[in-house]
Amino acid sequence: MEVRIRMQRSGNPAQKHSNWRIVAIPKQAPRDGRVLDIIGHYDPTKKPAQYKMDMAKMDKWIKTGAQMTDTVRSLYNKNKKQ
């Protein structure tokens, strides 16, 4: 099974307040489909944008062959530098 680490929308879009979860999910699953693991979250509505990532979970999924999307890779690299 191919696994992707990508964003999953959460929050209340009717109130223009969207949050995103960083999740490990099967590659063919829809954006809001069933997840394998929740790795972190990202809130772009805050200034500056806030994000938190469990690096141990992230490293575990990367070692098992999961591929990150470009956005998640960017957040991962920022989090590694801190």
Image (tube, grey):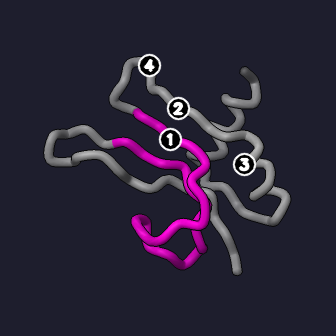
The residue beneath circle 3 is 58
Return the mark for residue 48: 4
Q: How many marks?
A: 4
Determine if the magenta segment contains residue 34: yes
Q: Are marks 1 and 4 in contact (CB under 8 Å)?
A: no
* Distance of label 3 from label 1 (alpha carbons): 12 Å
Mark 1 or mark 2: name the one nearer the start of the chain: 1
| Label 4 crowd (10 A; few <14 / some 14-19 / many >=20) | few
Mark 2 or mark 3: name the one nearer the start of the chain: 2
Query: Which of the 4 image quadrants contains residue 30?
Result: bottom left
| Label 3 crowd (10 A; few <14 / some 14-19 / many >=20) | many
Return the mark for residue 41: 1
Instruction: Give SS at disc 2.
Output: strand
Which amino acid lies under the numbered mark 2 shown in the image of this protein? Answer: Tyr
The residue beneath circle 2 is 51
Q: Are marks 3 and 4 in contact (CB under 8 Å)?
A: no
Which amino acid lies under the numbered mark 1 shown in the image of this protein? Answer: His
Indicate whether 10 appears above or below 47.
below
The main secondary structure of the magenta stretch is strand
